[in-house]
Image: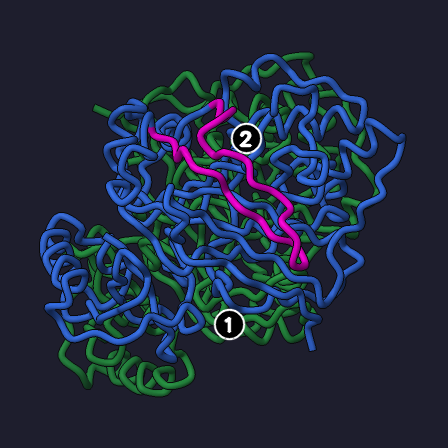
Chain colours: A green, B blue
Amino acid sequence: MKLATYKNDTRDGTLMLVSRDLKQTCSASDIAATMQDALDNWGAVEEKLQARYEQLNSGKVESEAFEQSKCESPLPRAYQWADGSAYVNHVELVRKARGATMPESFWTDPLMYQGGSDDFIGPRDDVILPSDEWGIDFEGEIAVVTDDVPMACSPETAASKIRLLMLVNDVSLRGLIPGELAKGFGFFQSKPASAFSPVAVTPDELGDKWKENKVHLPLLSTYNGELFGKPEAGEDMTFDFGQLIAHAAKSRNLGAGTIIGSGTVSNKQGTEHGSAISEGGVGYSCIAEVRMIETIRDGKPSTAFMRFGDTIHMEMRDSDGHSIFGEISQTIKKLN
Amino acid sequence: MKLATYKNDTRDGTLMLVSRDLKQTCSASDIAATMQDALDNWGAVEEKLQARYEQLNSGKVESEAFEQSKCESPLPRAYQWADGSAYVNHVELVRKARGATMPESFWTDPLMYQGGSDDFIGPRDDVILPSDEWGIDFEGEIAVVTDDVPMACSPETAASKIRLLMLVNDVSLRGLIPGELAKGFGFFQSKPASAFSPVAVTPDELGDKWKENKVHLPLLSTYNGELFGKPEAGEDMTFDFGQLIAHAAKSRNLGAGTIIGSGTVSNKQGTEHGSAISEGGVGYSCIAEVRMIETIRDGKPSTAFMRFGDTIHMEMRDSDGHSIFGEISQTIKKLN
């Protein structure tokens, strides 16, 4: 099942079903007014949504052309956004670039930060920030949306609570991160609003590409019109989504509609630190990794962070080349 | 105006008005179904709520006895909970206890962490956790609830967006904090669900005790039946709520219903590190501070953290001794 939220001049938008091929859409707001409503009552609405989804795919319900530009993030605001860092390769690289070793425990104990979730950016909306001197970066990730998750549950129970999958652009302000982390309270100001893919899908939509609680497909990031990364999201993911959710739930319940992120998708590529698309590698899902590799290799980074006017696109395609989640497509703009 | 959320077997409860003396209550759900709805549409509903509040206070509307035990936290779940640490004295003490100095910048640049907001605890509900070996502590704080706040606004604009005030018990797991902070991603697992006072009030309810964007009244914390702290929330608050909100909004908009916390209320008391109620001081709003002082004084802490069965009450009274927000009253219980 594929779901989206259309803008409608309300804070939470209106729930839509989207055909598997992303070509047609129909309202689902009579079943659940919003995405959060659907997640709040998943057990009661899933079957009805699924039935209409099948009608939509077979042309048996009135529908209109699906326009990704009409979409909010599937949850325009959420009660929780917690982002892991499951591609430990990415973490090791960050630390290596600044000459620090990585604790062994990072391979067994997930990193996770609490993100702001009150004001997500639409998948086709501009990323608006006051300054491009803050080291603006994209981070391409996968995220799951959960049902209610009980405190202290097992990774297996946690995995059974996954309801939807999305892509994320976890916008990061690299210039603000060192100062924020030095204060010891987390990323706060250095993690502005994130954006999610136009479409959220149930795991069954991925067929055998969803296994062991990971998505086994490349995440495509296109930066200023050039393919920047295509790492395989199922590779080098040290912690699967069941483990990440259980980590989040160690000392608390998670409410329905909780979004848990994978962290920046990153592949080791059989080398010490991966390689760029132009070098025949799978590239990267953020600028920071390229800069790290440049720093390790050349002593200093040469690729700049994003400036006003720069664009980022993120997408994931199935084995036949069809877009699964629609495309995140954003331009960095200055706050007026 | 005083508002509360009564439990009603839904996730967000139902909006109630509460009389100034906390004795009577009446529904406001025909004006706004939930607290979040009221905050989403504050401009449209404030006047109507205020009119009914005046009727309630003068006995001109049908009402029932207000029961704090029927309350959820005013926002049972919220889209954002970001907690400052504005009583820098508290921060300095924490660091002193572990032999670390505090950077000078902490006096000019607020500390703030992003907290989980998807599943707050009711003000009279148990604090349920899997283990009491994790160093369970209370933290008594003040919080504000904001309207929409524009990115990069001034502290003055930020202050004008304050809609409601509440008390908070920011439950903390002291035993998990060092490990979490060492990972550099913030408190995450060491900050389980928080609880808020039964009643949220508009700033005008505090009269001249609300000035310079601070609450100038003592916060009373009673631990296992004994008064533990009565520090004055307006004293030694290095950053006022306007500054804290503006800090949160530096790189993002804040959505209506955002909760911003003050951090643990702590007074210097004209001494190097305050003193306990039993020593004639104003005491503390968390156990950790007592332990810090014991550590500084005796080389090790002697006061234990909370165990299953321990109780914490928090309240704030006006100049005439009347409770303003109702009472947070909780027992620590083991997860079944």
Q: How many marks?
A: 2
Q: Report the residue marked by disc 1.
A: A148
Q: Is residue A215 among what the camera can see?
A: yes
Q: Quadrant of residue A124?
A: top left
Q: Is residue A232 among what the camera can see?
A: no
Magenta residues, start to end? B213-238
Q: Report the residue marked by disc 2.
A: A278
Residue shown at the point (63%, 28%) measured from the top left: B91
Q: Are marks 2 and 1 in contact (CB under 8 Å)?
A: no
Q: Does the segment drawn in magenta span residue B237?
A: yes
* In the foreground, A57 or B67: B67
* In the foreground, A156 or B161: B161
In the rendered structure, the residue with mark 2 lies on which chain? A
Residue shown at the point (52%, 74%) measured from the top left: A207
In the rendered structure, the residue with mark 1 lies on which chain? A
Q: Measured from the top left, where is residue B249 in percent x and y?
A: 36, 32
The dominant secondary structure in magenta is loop
Q: Does the segment drawn in magenta span residue A324?
A: no
